[in-house]
Amino acid sequence: MKAITVIPGRPDQVRVSDLDEPTPGPDDLLVEGRLLGICGTDTDIVEGHDYGWPPPGRERLVIGHESLGTVIQAPPGTPFAPGDLVAGMVRRPDPVPCEPCGHGEPDFCRNGLYTERGIKELDGYGSQRWVVDTQYAIKLDPGLGDCGVLLEPASVLAKAWEQSERIFSRATWRPKVALVTGAGPIGLLAALMGVQRGLEVHVLDLHDRGPRRRLVTDLGAAFHVGELGDLDVVPDVVMECTGHGPLVFGLAERVAPDAVICLLGIMPAAHPAEARLDEINKQMVLKNTVVFGSVNASRRNFEQAADALSKADRGWLTRMITRRIPMRDFADGLHKHPDDVKVVVDLQV
């Protein structure tokens, strides 16, 4: 069996390795890998931005956390059957467990002892066949086809929107205008879910390249190019998908009263910038502004994401996948071409 393996922090050590076939346990699905999505986390792992840990006692990690596959074998008495289209969840609860992990919310793990497929101490989904416990498998609408590979990033946005809506429940009013910063895959999925909620959605990006403008406008959202200061929009809710610190500080001064800003991006390098912290603090206090970070997702969020994708236009989702590469080209796929949105690996080639 072929698998994409890496030594975290060693870009010269990305390879397609021959591994033993996986052996499913009594509660596991045996899955034929179909597609693997590539995201910035994979780049961070390979290039060594203080991220990525192989399983204990090993040097190499099977990479990949954005999965899609077809069930080969399923335990009897479960909701799964051979031929089902599935994706695997990423995070596993810590062994202690902490309170959130003990209640099925490892995305809120409090002690950091969680593990993650393809990221932290567990092999990922970048292999021609993989196994996953049924409790961490998500059955997808078969009509999604290859677009099912978008489930994991979509789950991150499902959680972000869910948490934002919980914060908005503190008052009687509800948001009408949403701003998404960054028009990459996460930003586009954030915009999709904002439109599905009936919001007036604006997407801001530094560049107008490739299919991004058309993808945004075909949702019925507005696409803007430039800096935050060029934008004549006062949002009630923001999905910040760039991880650019100065932008975060700028947003705190530009949002409407009682706004919620969800931070979803992380930049690997520090970019020093001046910020009027006293004024930002003043504005946040006087406007009841909430800024919060969100990472990963629970099973509930994966299921919400599966529902959101099933309701989306299939043609639009298909256009998000702009490049499909064989396993041997994984290292090249880490570096986006100008027209790329989502790059995926064909695990059978």
Image: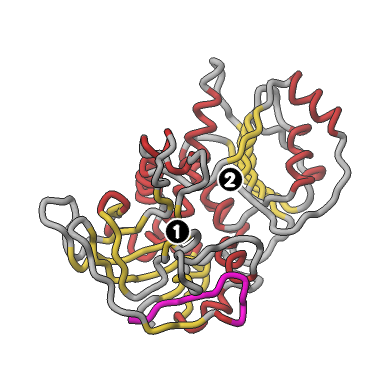
**What is the span of residues highlighted in magenta in the rendered image?**
1-12
In this picture, residue 251 sits left or right of residue 310: right
Q: Secondary structure at mark 1?
A: helix
Q: Position of residue 203 (x, y in %)?
A: 64, 47
Q: Quadrant of the N terminus?
A: bottom left
Residue 300, percent across and down?
37, 40
Q: Earlier in the sequence, mark 1 or mark 2?
A: 2
Relative image position of residue 239 (x, y in whole percent): 61, 42
**Magenta span includes 76:** no
From this view, report whether residue 23 is shown above or below residue 169: below
* Residue at image mark 1: 317
Mark 2 surroundings: few (<14), some (14-19) or many (≥20) residues within 10 A: many
Distance, label 1 to label 2, CA atoms, is 15 Å
Q: Are dots 1 and 2 in contact, CB under 8 Å?
A: no
Q: Is residue 223 left or right of residue 133?
A: right
Which residue is depicted at the point 46% across and 64% down? Answer: 56
Choose between 231 and 19: the one closer to the eye: 19
| Amino acid beneath label 1 | Leu
Name the residue located 25 percent from the left edge and 53 percent from the top edge.
134
Query: Counting other residues with Cα less than 10 Å from the Cα at mark 1, is it few (<14), some (14-19), or many (20 or more)?
Result: some
Which residue is at a point 41% across and 76% down the rendered structure image? 346
Q: Residue furthest front?
A: 57
Q: Is residue 41 left or right of residue 33?
A: right
Residue 107 in the image, given as x and y percentages of width and height? 47, 43
* Image quarter of the C terminus: bottom left
Residue 64 visible here: no
Say which mark, if any, is on residue 221. Answer: 2
In-front residue for pair 98/221:
98
When the figure is inspected, residue 307 is found, relative to residue 291, above or below; the finding is: below
Q: Tell me the amino acid under the disc marked 2.
A: Ala
